[in-house]
Structure formats: structure tokens, C-alpha cells
Image: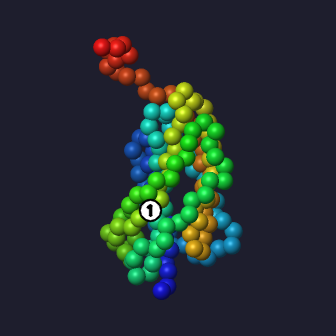
Amino acid sequence: MTTRTFRFRVLVSYVAAATIISTAVVAQNAPSFNYTGFDATPVKPVQLGFYGALHKDCSPAPLPTIRVTEAPKSGTLTIRPGQLTTSATAQCPGVKIPAEVAFYQARSGATGTDRLVYEVIEANHVAAYDVTITIKEAPKSTVPNSDKPI
């Protein structure tokens, strides 16, 4: 069976901005590098990306492998299973496929800048993601006396 691999990225920052990108992946020897940045707080995880693949006949291809090459120092990178709808792919509209989802969670009390690097390894392609995270203080509650016990 001929395999057509697509890389899907959905980037969502804590301010709820979203972008869907779909690109055909061709065989390459060297990994492609992607640089991006996010804002984070210790209160809520930040979704870094979705990664899944399709065969040419629009059936799900094997999930890519995600490998951490540089771990974050002020938080954690977690990979969870998820599902992706191929709304940005004209050849296979509306197909739901399994995906790997990358999340970053800042440690409690952390502020400043953190960095992590991971690779998404597919059958014919390796994409490296160099991510800079700006960790901000968690927003203060606007509810009066919310810091006092009941």
C-alpha cells in the first residue's frame, strides 16, 4: 500500500489562539528544524502540537514516534494520545485519526525562560521542534478573600 504521510500541527497557547497546518512530507535525510515559542503559567498545561499520519487512501498510518532530545529544566513535557480531524487536508476532509499530543507544564513557582527540543519521527521524515517557553506568574484571583480558608 502506498503511504502518503501528512504532518499536522495544532498550536494552542494559553490565550486560546489556534492554527492548523497540513503539509505533505517527503523523504529527507536530515531532520527539518522548527523553532517556536509559547507563554505558560504553572497553573495550566500548554498544548505544543498534534502529530498524526494518513495513508494515500485516507486510512490512518502508524503514529509517529516522539523523542525528547533536550528535556525542559523548569517544567515537564508530556506526550498523550489524542484524536485529530483532518479539516485542513483537501484529499481527506473530515477523517478522524489517532494522534500524539505534546504538552508542556511549568513547575509550581517557576518563572523566566525554559527550553525543550523534541523530534517527531515518521516513516520518511524527521522534524525537530526547538521550543522556547516564557513562564509567567499565575494570574491572581479576582475574587475577594479567595486566599483565606472558609
Q: Secondary structure at mark 1?
A: strand
| Rendering colour mode | rainbow
Pick out the residue farthest to the right. Answer: 30
Image x and y of residue 130, in percent: 62, 52
Image x and y of residue 55, in percent: 45, 78
Say few, some or many: other residues with alpha carbon within 10 Å of mark 1 (under 14 / 14 to 19 / 20 or more): many
Quadrant position of residue 65: bottom right
Quadrant position of residue 140: top left
Q: Which residue is the site of mark 1?
A: 99
- Identify the residue at image location x=30%, y=14%: 150
- Identify the residue at image location x=49%, y=67%: 63
Q: Vertical placement of 3 versus 62: above or below?
A: below
Pick out the residue farthest to the bottom. Answer: 1
Q: Nearer the viewer, residue 10 or 110?
A: 110
Q: Vertical placement of 20 versus 57: above or below?
A: above
Q: Nearer the viewer, residue 103 or 14?
A: 103
Q: Nearer the viewer, residue 79 or 90?
A: 79
- Identify the residue at image location x=59%, y=66%: 121
Does 21 sit left or right of 116 as displayed?
left
Does 101 sit left or right of 135 as displayed?
left
Q: Vertical placement of 143 versus 38: above or below?
A: above
Q: Nearer the viewer, residue 87 or 107?
A: 107
Image x and y of residue 147, in percent: 38, 16
- Residue type at numbered disc 1: Ala
Q: Is residue 38 visible?
A: no
